[in-house]
Image (tube, grey):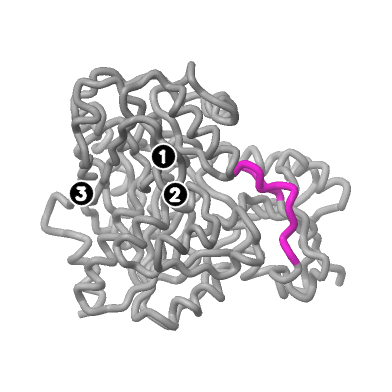
Amino acid sequence: MSKRKVVIIGAAGRDFHNFNTFFRDNPDYEVLAFTATQIPNIEGRMYPPELAGELYPNGIPIKPEEELEELISANSVDVAVFAYSDLPHEEVMHLASRVNAAGADYWLMGLKSTQIKSSKPLISICATRTGCGKSQTTRKVCNTLRSLGKKVAVIRHPMPYGDLVAQRVQKYETLEDMDRHKCTIEEREEYEPHIREGNILFAGVDYRDILRAAEEVADVVVWDGGNNDTPFYKADLNIVVADPHRAGHELTYHPGEANIRMADVIIINKMDSAKSDQIAILEENIKMANPDARVIPADSEIKVDDPSVIRGKKVVVVEDGPTLTHGEMRYGAGYIAAQRNGAGEIVDPRPFLQGDLKTTFEKYSHLENVVPAMGYGEGQIADLEATIKAVDAEGVVVGTPIDLSLVLNIDKPHTRVYYDLVERGDLTVDTVVRELFQ
């Protein structure tokens, strides 16, 4: 029997994981290419032979998603595997139509084919959309585990935007480790809060090897999911965070709907800044999709370290990048903090955009009054710094969860915004975590 020819449609994350767990050593399939989208400048690379395995001595090319139909028709591809996240169901099926029209089967791979079992207890934190509050939930889970005397290793969803061989298994214990691994702003946004909390963090490309490394140093492994993807590992406790600001998306986005349907515990976050009708829609959808899930109502408590930078001033707000871009939020914690702390004016940054940020605003046309902290490479970081410098503002509200001044020069007074999960009722994260070890 001849091998079935495969293209994996991805964005430098789930696509690599699906390949590593199902296709890498599978003699029944030949993966001809990955396609890439969603993340800037990740196409045109090669999935290296050191990671691809013995069946792929020359590695596997990574092509732009725009070339999908050409790849299928030119190579008589049998199967195209969809393998990235945070897309509305309609777009997922548009891709299916493109694939089917070009002549190939269209696959959505399930957990049985791709999940890995840990030898240690494992808690998974995922979400319905990007920017729901997974990281603050993960930090809270880790705090409880440490209070129980457990050694904790956090494994973060992949963001391998650099040298894939060097990034095969990454371990972070200090802020200097982020410099050593040449982290982008997007990576720092996820890694820095964990490091400051004292959590040992792992990430990279090969999540079987990453899990084994984490198991060597930890009593409990915590999966900190990203981009509303489904967990790479089998969980003993599956927590999913939902955002009422995007009520309805929990049933209309992939694979966020899968997450909500298989959750043990669902956290309705940001209730303090959401409208009552949004919360009601989300609650009703949870009851319909997963009536057996335990639901934790919660607020995202926002604090700033220097309110005087905001009060009565003209300020520009810089927010977490992915939350605003493919997460489709119009604002984040920084904008809310600016409003609550009496900003005189929140400046529209669009007349001052520099370089690649202009392209970002063209692509994500819902953006208006905030700047996404785009930083997938040195060029974008330079454009972000130049934009902040150009904006006619007296201060900068930094809503991204990192100390942005460690990455770029901010030439105006600035204040950081912090946000923590605060549960509203008797059922808490601490409660459900402790139950796991009773």
**Quadrant for the N terminus in the image:** bottom right
Judged by its main secondary structure, the magenta piece is: loop
Which of marks 1 and 3 precedes in the sequence? 1
Residue on which disc 1 sits = 249
Identify the residue position indicated by label 2 in the image: 256
Asked if the stretch drawn in magenta spans residue 211, the answer is no
How crowded is the residue under tag 1: few (<14 C-alpha within 10 Å), some, or many (20+)? many
Residue drawn at 29 percent across, 20 percent down: 314
Query: Of 163 and 405, which appears nearest the observer?
Result: 405
What residue sits 78% from the left and 71% below the top? 28
| Cβ atoms at labels 2 and 1 below 8 Å apart | yes
Which quadrant holds the C terminus?
bottom left
What residue is pinned by disc 3?
Answer: 297
Question: Looking at this view, is 384 or 45 the one in front?
Answer: 384
Query: What's the distance in space between the residues labelled 2 and 1, CA to CA?
Result: 8 Å
Residues at marks 3 and 1 touching, judged by CB atoms closer than 8 Å: no
- SS at mark 3? strand
User: Which residue is at a point 33% across and 51% down the rendered structure image?
Assistant: 241
